[in-house]
Image (tube, coloured by chain):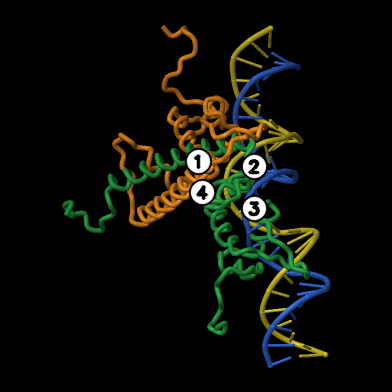
Chain colours: A green, B orange, C blue, D yellow
DNA sequence: CTTGACATTCACGTCAACGTCAAGGTTTAT
DNA sequence: ATAAACCTTGACGTTGACGTGAATGTCAAG
């Protein structure tokens, strides 16, 4: 029963496959590791070995980067998502909690700024006179 | 009636004052100009002369940069705020409108990502066991 | 007329988030 | 056993948003 195409189950993956499956380059994956965002194990030959969970992890990281956060703050933020439903509760000391609280504030500020400006652009687009190679359009 | 301290009314300002009033460096203001975000006039001596509106303009730009947008997209976005309440309606051709629509989508995506992750961090903070040098705390 | 606080234009330095080789070891296919 | 397709570690290049001078001009005050 193991000859039916590639099994996509819960097995460790090497850097190439993880790259393909997440859409980032291997360089990026090594960079994320260097920044403490990923912690792959090593096979006997030195090859990196990622757990399946790294796929979603990388997507998380990309999400946060696209949202404008730096790897430094992502490093402190991503552990929050590890055990969503897991049993592991990483030790959270007061300093980490304070840092996270600060980050939440910054994210709020970012969301605010983005929302305000997006709305302004939208209002502008709705209020703007659309092109019209013909200047006769009577609003319908 | 003109001897009562410094008049904060509607007069042109030079780069130093604008920098102080917006909290950015003069270097940053020149950079914004280079990027097409500001268009100060010049006095006879070559000094830049900014209108009062530049204060809010710079704040806008900072807002958008903090939100993660690049000067390139800000350059296309900021004109939307020029005439909020003004009479001038800059010519908006289809291409600009399309660009702006794309930017609005990207901003939506950013807001989405930020909101999701902020909420996750918040959930984590609420669910996390706070510090406790004493390990006896019985959930109350 | 010099000093000091402003302004000007180069122009190189920095930091983050990667891209892009280079020079090799490993595994797989033929 | 040799090529092709992986992987490894350096290490230098790039882009964006500025920082940080250097060398110079301008202007009000003493």
Determine whether the residue tagged by mark 3 lies in a helix, strand or loop.
loop
Q: Residues within 10 Å of mark 4 (few under 14, many from 20)?
A: many
Left or right of B68? Residue D18 is right
Q: Residue A83 placed where, x, y %?
A: 57, 51
Find residue A103 and report its image quarter.
top right
User: Which of label 2 and label 1 is nearer to you?
Assistant: 2
Query: Residue B71 versus residue A48: which sits nearer the camera?
Result: A48
User: Which of label 2 and label 4 is nearer to you?
Assistant: 2
Quote the CA–CA distance across marks 2 and 1.
16 Å
Q: Mark 2 points at which residue?
A: A91
- Which dot marks residue A67? 4
- Which dot marks residue A37? 3
x 54%, y 50%: residue: A64
Task: Tell whether label 1 touches label 2 (CB within 8 Å).
Answer: no
Q: Residue A86 placed where, x, y %?
A: 56, 53
For the residues beneath circles 2 and 4, the answer to whether they share a chain is yes
For the residues beneath circles 1 and 3, the answer to whether they share a chain is no
């Amino acid at each position: 029963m193991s000859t039916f195409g590639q099994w996509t189950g819960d097995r460790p993956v090497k850097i190439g496959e993880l790259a393909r499956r997440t859409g980032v380059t291997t360089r990026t994956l090594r960079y994320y590791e260097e920044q403490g965002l990923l912690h792959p194990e090593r096979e006997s030959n030195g090859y990196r070995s990622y757990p399946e969970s790294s796929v979603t992890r990388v997507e998380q990281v990309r999400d946060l980067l696209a949202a404008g956060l730096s790897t430094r703050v992502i490093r402190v933020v991503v552990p929050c998502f590890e055990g969503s439903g897991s049993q592991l509760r990483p030790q959270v000391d007061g300093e980490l909690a304070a840092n996270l609280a600060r980050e939440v504030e910054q994210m709020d500020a970012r969301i605010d700024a983005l929302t305000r400006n997006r709305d302004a652009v939208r209002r502008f687009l709705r209020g703007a006179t659309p092109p019209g190679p013909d200047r006769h359009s009577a609003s319908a």
